[in-house]
Image: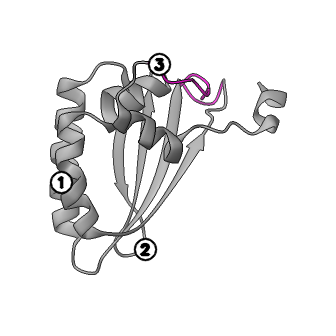
């Protein structure tokens, strides 16, 4: 399983456009993809700041099934027009305090598309040792 928490800061005045893009991506993700456990977005108290929580059956489901899907690739350029800053962090659900399974690294299949390999270099899960000590 893989769970990622993303903090997004939008450019001033781009909140409405961001939410339109995010709503469409949410709908497409849940309608077209398999292995989606969570795909949620929230507004923060800070103006223009949002959090997204994404959880998938495993890392390859996230990377190949979601990240390089046609609908995500189509949404990426418009998102880059409105997002000022993005911080992505892999998080590990605390068993007994979350219904989600642990976040675990996973190797890409050898026949993964080149674009998946490129994203993998940027997004690869690196699980800190301290997670394992508490599992």
Which tag is nearer the camera, tag 2 or tag 3?
A: 3
Residues under numbered marks 2 and 3 in contact, where contact means CB atoms less than 8 Å apart: no
- For the stretch drawn in magenta, the main secondary structure is loop
For residue 49, which numbered disc appears in the image? none
Q: Position of residue 62 (x, y in %)?
A: 40, 30
Specify few, some or many for label 3: CA neighbours under 10 Å numbering under 14, 14-19, or 20 or more.
Answer: few
Q: According to the image, label 1 marks what residue?
A: 21
First to last magenta residue range: 96-110
Residues under numbered marks 1 and 2 in contact, where contact means CB atoms less than 8 Å apart: no
Q: Which residue extends farthest bottom?
A: 12
Which tag is nearer the camera, tag 1 or tag 3?
A: 3
For residue 46, which numbered disc appears in the image? 2
- Is 22 drawn above or below residue 2 in the view shown? below
Total marks shown come to 3
For residue 110, which numbered disc appears in the image? 3
Q: Secondary structure at mark 3?
A: loop
Magenta segment includes 111: no
User: 104 or 15: which is nearer to us?
Assistant: 104
Q: Toward which corner of the image does residue 8 lie, by quadrant?
A: bottom left
């Amino acid at each position: 399983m893989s769970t990622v928490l993303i903090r997004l800061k939008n450019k001033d005045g781009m909140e409405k456009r961001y939410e339109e893009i995010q709503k469409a991506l949410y709908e497409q993700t849940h309608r077209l993809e398999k292995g989606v456990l969570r795909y949620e977005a929230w507004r923060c108290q800070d103006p223009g700041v949002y959090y997204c929580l994404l959880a998938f059956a495993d890392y390859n489901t996230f990377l190949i099934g979601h990240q390089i899907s046609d609908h995500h690739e189509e949404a990426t350029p418009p998102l880059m027009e409105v997002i000022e800053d993005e911080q992505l962090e892999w998080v590990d659900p605390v068993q007994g305090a979350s219904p989600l399974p642990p976040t675990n690294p996973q190797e890409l299949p050898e026949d993964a598309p080149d674009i998946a390999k490129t994203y993998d270099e940027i997004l690869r899960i690196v699980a800190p040792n301290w997670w394992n000590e508490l599992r």
